[in-house]
Amino acid sequence: VLLMLVAHLPVCQRTYCTERHQSSVIMEASKKHPLDTFTHLSITYHESLPHVTHIKLNRPRKRNAINALMWREIGEAFRQIGTIGDGTRCVLLSGSGKGFCGGIDITDEKFFSGISPDSSSDDDESSIDMARKALAFKPQISEMQAAFTALEECPVPVVAAIHGACVGAGIDMTCCADVRICSPNTIFSIREARLGLAADVGTLQRFPKLVGFGSRVRELCFTGEDFSPEDALNIGFVSRISKSESQLFEEANKIIAKIIANSPVAVTVTKSSLNYSRDHTVREGLDHVALTNSAALMSEDLVKSFMMTSGGGGAAEFAPLLPHSRL
């Protein structure tokens, strides 16, 4: 059936035009990204790869430590990427300056104001019931969790290129990425225990599901000690280490180029199924992908992908994903 469909495709759909590809990359890279409006995030189209958005944490003087505003921006950006007609099929996530992310910005008082909320009455703050304080503070934690979950729920893959320090909230955030690679100078740390708290925005839930619940994982969580790129590779937290920091993006680009060469429908459905299956039984995962694929297999991308893999037309050109419908 596929061969019959391929035979009826116009020649222009069965061939790949290198000049057109290069032109689209140049035009896209020079175009302002519709989400390049944030204070602490730099959001641009990739300079050499089409259909790729580069999101860069942009507080280099603070080692990209995340303050309240930056935290909100991360959630807002990833809730929109790939859903607004921006043409994104993959996201490259990185940090500017000397490190990826130095964790939470503990100098931002907004993070801790909820622990001791101002009373609207004249009563002494110490008289406020502890349970009421806790109920008032919980929504802030939930909001912070949701911001990082937005990476996980982003419909397109997120590839994190990590260098320098990646501690605390940096681990929380990268746990939500789909692919993680790092440079040889990266320092990882689940540091919350050393700061007097349990990590509460995702690491304790996601990190063990990524690498297992073994002794080494618990050791890292309990001690808050640093661990190396080699440790991260051995336990499966990163999939590769670049030869040098200068080659980090080159490695990331190799992965991204392979992702965007595939059907955006297939990749999006694959990410959705992986995430769903992680949190459900095998039977439930099978039912989920069967339902999703019963629609996705109707895509014209199937024929184009068949032609590409069978060597009949080089790399395929796929139509962009449509903007998500919203009220």
Image: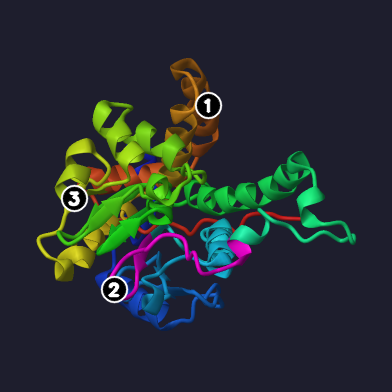
Q: Position of residue 82 (x, y in %)?
A: 51, 59
- Span colored in magenta: 92-111
- Badge 3, how many Cα within 10 Å: few under 14, some, many 20+? some
Across and down, in percent, residue 269 comes to: 46, 40
- Quick check: 313 above or below 28? above
On residue 48, the disc is 2
- Residue 23 falls in image quadrant: bottom left
Residue 288 marker:
1
Q: Residue 16, located in which quarter of the rendered image? A: bottom left
Q: Is residue 102 magenta?
A: yes
> Which amino acid type corresponds to the residue marked 2 in the rendered image?
Ser
Q: Residue at horizontal 53%, vertical 26%?
A: 288
Calculate the distance from the C-alpha at mark 1 to the C-alpha at mark 2. 36 Å
Question: Height in image: 202 above or below 147?
Answer: above
The quadrant of the rendering that contains the N terminus is: top left
Residue 165 in sight in this render = yes
